[in-house]
Amino acid sequence: MPDITASELHQRQQAGETPTIIDVREPWEFEESRISGSQNIPLGNLPQQLDDLEDLKDQEVIVHCKSGTRSSAAKAFLTQQGFTNVRNLEGGITAYQAK
């Protein structure tokens, strides 16, 4: 699946869409700022949370972090676990907040 730009995500949210967004930053980062509707699962906790995400395997899942590095790793991990529609937010929350 191709990654998603901050502009595309903004447009979809403004159109009323509520995509599944997973923030893979640490809890303290999530507390400081977050994308509305996102859930926080730190990258290091993803393996333990797989059972909770099972229902999302064939749905679009957008992952993000601060700049895109950790979420790239999250996308690769989830894809290896059989998730078929994982998209990384290009530039992370930094790009999203700049919009």
Image (cartoon, grey):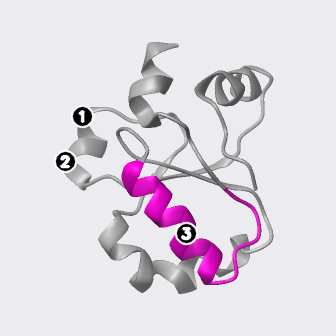
Give the residue type that dot 2 points to.
Trp
Q: Position of 53 compared to 27: left or right?
A: right
The residue that appears at 45% across and 64% down in the rendered structure is: 73
Q: Quadrant of the N terminus?
A: bottom right
Query: Residue 15 at what x, y percent from top left?
Result: 80, 22
Of the two numbered discs 3 and 2 on the same chain, state the one appearing first in sequence.
Answer: 2
Q: Nearer the viewer, residue 89 or 41?
A: 89
Tell me the amino acid under the disc marked 3. Ala
Residue displayed at 76% across by 28% down: 12
Left or right: residue 80 versus residue 58 is: left
The residue lying at 45 percent from left, 37 percent from top is 92
For label 1, the residue is 32
The numbered mark at residue 76 is 3
Front disc: 3 or 2: 3
Q: Secondary structure at mark 3?
A: helix
Identified by mark 1, the residue type is Glu
Tell me whether circle 2 and circle 1 mark residues in contact (CB < 8 Å).
yes
Q: Quadrant of residue 17?
A: top right
Judge by depth and name the residue closer to the eye, 26 or 87.
Answer: 87
Element type at mark 1 = helix
Residue 75 location, quadrant? bottom right
Q: Which residue is mark 2?
A: 28
Residue 29 on the magenta segment: no
Identify the main secondary structure in magenta.
helix
- CB under 8 Å between discs 3 and 1: no
Residue 44, quarter of picture: bottom left
Decide which of tag 3 and tag 1 comes sooner along the chain: 1
What residue occupies the far left of the structure in this picture? 28
Query: Which range of residues does the magenta coloring cover?
Result: 69-86
Q: Position of residue 6 (x, y in %)?
A: 59, 27
As measured in the structure, the alpha-carbon distance from the residue carrying label 3 to the one carrying label 1 is: 26 Å
